[in-house]
Image (tube, rainbow, N blue to C red):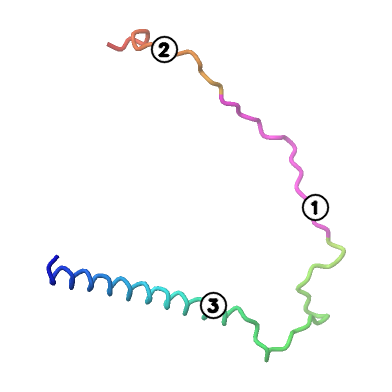
Amino acid sequence: MSPFDMLLFFFFILVTIKAATSCIDYWRDIDDELAEASAPHRTATRATLSRTVRTGRPSSVRVTPIKRVDAPARVYARSNNRQNNLKDKGAA
């Protein structure tokens, strides 16, 4: 193996290592930004519901599930065990 070939392989190895470390650093930065964005802030106070503005559901409201009147028809696949020869179908 010539010295030029060794330098060429060494260059490709260095480029691959640099690309891998850049990729890892990029995704680590993204993860850090997402962790900061999703973390609750300590300085914010918790807002309470006032009596005039209600965003919650009142206790008198009940959610009822939808009842299906007709069940959907079931479709079964039929297996065709009979084999047709090409001569029976009119193929040459």
> Which of pointers 1 and 2 lies earlier in the amino acid sequence?
1
What residue lies at 32% left-to-right and 76% top-to-bottom? 18
Looking at the rendering, in which quadrant would you find the N terminus? Answer: bottom left
Quarter of the rendering containing residue 69: top right
Q: In this figure, which residue is indicated by the disc labeled 1? A: 64
Tag 1 near tag 2, CB within 8 Å: no
Position of residue 42 relative to residue 66, above or below, is below
Is 39 on the left or on the right of 12, as rendered?
Answer: right
- Within the magenta stretch, is there residue 82? no
Position of residue 73 relative to residue 82, above or below, is below
What residue lies at 87% left-to-right and 63% top-to-bottom? 60
What residue occupies the far front of the structure in this picture? 1
- The disc labelled 2 sits on which kind of residue? Asn
> Which of pointers 3 and 2 lies earlier in the amino acid sequence?
3
Is 91 on the left or on the right of 44, as rendered?
Answer: left
The 10 Å Cα crowd at callout 2, few under 14, some 14 to 19, many 20 or more, is: few
- The disc labelled 3 sits on which kind of residue? Leu
Which mark is nearer the camera, 1 or 2?
2
Tell me the magenta residue range: 62-77
What residue lies at 45% left-to-right and 74% top-to-bottom? 27
Please tell me which residue lies in front, 64 or 53: 64
Q: Work out how far the residue at label 3 is from the one at label 1, CA to CA, in angstroms.
A: 38 Å
Is 7 on the left or on the right of 45, as rendered?
Answer: left
- The disc labelled 1 sits on which kind of residue? Thr
Q: Work out how far the residue at label 3 is from the one at label 2, CA to CA, in angstroms.
A: 62 Å
Position of residue 15 relative to residue 76, above or below, is below
The 10 Å Cα crowd at callout 1, few under 14, some 14 to 19, many 20 or more, is: few
SS at circle 1: loop
